[in-house]
Amino acid sequence: MRRKILSFLTSLSTLWLLVGVACQYVPPHLFWAAGFVAMSLPGALVLNGVLLLLWLWQRPVWALWPALLIFLFWSQHTRYFSLNTPDAQPEPEEQRIKVLSYNVRVFNVYKHLHEADPALPEKEMEWVAEHHADILCLQEFYHDKTDNTYNSRKRIGKQQDREIYVGKALTNKIGAEFGLAIFSRFPIVEKGSVVFDRPTKNQVIYVDVKLPSKDTLRVYNMHLESMAIEEKDVEAAVQSEAGLKTKGRNIARRLKGGFIARSYQVEKLLEHIQASRHPVLLCGDLNDLPSSYTYQKLRGQLQNAFEEGGSGFGFTYNGKLPIRIDNQFYSDRLELLRFDVLDQIQFTDHFPLESTYVLTAPVEEEGN
C-alpha cells in the first residue's frame, strides 16, 4: 500500500515537473493559466526531492527515477539554490565594474514607512550615497530638491561624482520625482527608455557608459509590472476558508494581470536588448519568480548573476514570503567576479544586490 502511494506521488510529481517546465515557455498573454502552473514549479522540485529520499528508504532502485529528474532539471534547482565562491584571482582594480541594484522604496519618505524609526530615511540615503559602486540602478526612486534628506540627485550624484539619468514616472504637486534612476561614475554617452505598447506606470530605462578601457557598456534598469499583493492578504487567504474566498480570488486576479502584463513587457525589453550594439547589463525588480515565463525569456538570452555567482537561496524580498524577484542579468562579454544579496541591509522591503564584473575583449571572428 505504501509503495502504491509513493508510485502515485512519483507519477504526479513527474507530470507536474514536466508541465511546469513547459509552461515557462508559454506567454501568459496567450494562455494565462500557464503563469500559475509555472509559479507552482518549486513545489514539484521539492516533492521530487522528498520522493528521492523516501524511495532510498523503501526501495533504492526506484530512487533512480527521481534522481534522473533532478539531473535532467538541475538548472531549475539552481534558479532557487546556488553554491558558488568568489573568483580567487580577480582582475586588476581599475578594470572592475562595481554595481549596486536596489529597490529603495522611495527612500521611506511616507510617514507610515518610517514611523518606527524616524531616522530611517536619512540612514538609507546615506548608505546608498556612500556605497562604493561605480553604477547604481535604483527602483522606486524618489527625489525632492527642496529637502536636504531627499535631495537624492545631489547626494547620490553630484556629491559622489556620479552622472545621473532619471526616468520619471510621476512628478507630484511639490515637484518631487518618482521613477527609476541610474547613477554612474563612468561618463554617460547615451540614454533613453524602452517604450511599452500598453499603458503602465512601470518602466525600463537605459544608459550607455564609456568605460576606462574605451569600451561602451549598456546598462538597463527595470521595474516590471508589480504583483500588487499585500502580505496580509496572503496570510488571510491561508489562515481560513473565509479568507481564501474573500482574499484568494483577488490575489488570483492580480497575479493573472501581472503575468499577462510582464509577458508583453519582457518581449519588448528583449527586442530592445537584441538591437544593442554593446554588451548589456540588466538590473532591477523583475516582480516575477525564477520559474516564470518572464525569467525564462531573459535567461534564454542573458546569464543570471545569482545562478552564476550567488550562494544559498538568494531571497531578495525582505518579508515573510521567501522569494527572489530582484535580479541582475548580463551578456557574454561581461565576466562576473562576485555577486551578493545584502540581506543584512534592511531599510526597505527589498535587499540590495551587489556585484563586480569585468568586460572581456570581443571574440575575433575566424579569418581575421
Image (tube, rainbow, N blue to C red):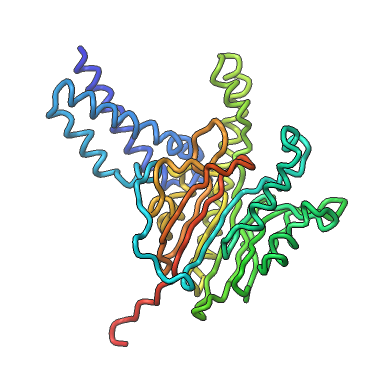
Residue 307 image point, x, y percent: 39, 51
Vertical side of 184 occupied by 115: above or below: above
Task: Name the residue at 29% across, 31% down.
Answer: 48
Residue 100 image point, x, y percent: 56, 57
Vertical side of 356 occupied by 278: above or below: below
Camera-nearest residue between 1 and 42: 42
Corner quadrant of residue 111: top right
- The number of numbered discs placed on residues in the rendered structure image is 0
Camera-nearest residue between 161 and 366: 161
Corner quadrant of residue 359: bottom left
Quarter of the image with the C terminus is bottom left
User: Residue placed farthest to the top in the image?
Assistant: 1
In the image, taking residue 167 as reference, residue 312 lies left or right, namely left
Task: Name the residue at 41% across, 61% down.
Answer: 337
Corner quadrant of residue 238: top right
Vertical side of 138 occupied by 83: above or below: above
Residue 267 image point, x, y percent: 52, 56
In the image, taking residue 202 as reference, residue 24 lies left or right, namely left
Task: Name the residue at 44% across, 64% down.
Answer: 331
Camera-nearest residue between 261 and 1: 1
User: Residue placed farthest to the left in the image?
Assistant: 61
In the image, taking residue 180 as reference, residue 283 lies left or right, namely left
Vertical side of 38 occupied by 241: above or below: above
Residue 265 image point, x, y percent: 57, 53
Quarter of the image with the N terminus is top left
Task: Name the residue at 47% across, 57% down.
Answer: 329
User: Residue placed farthest to the right in the image?
Assistant: 174
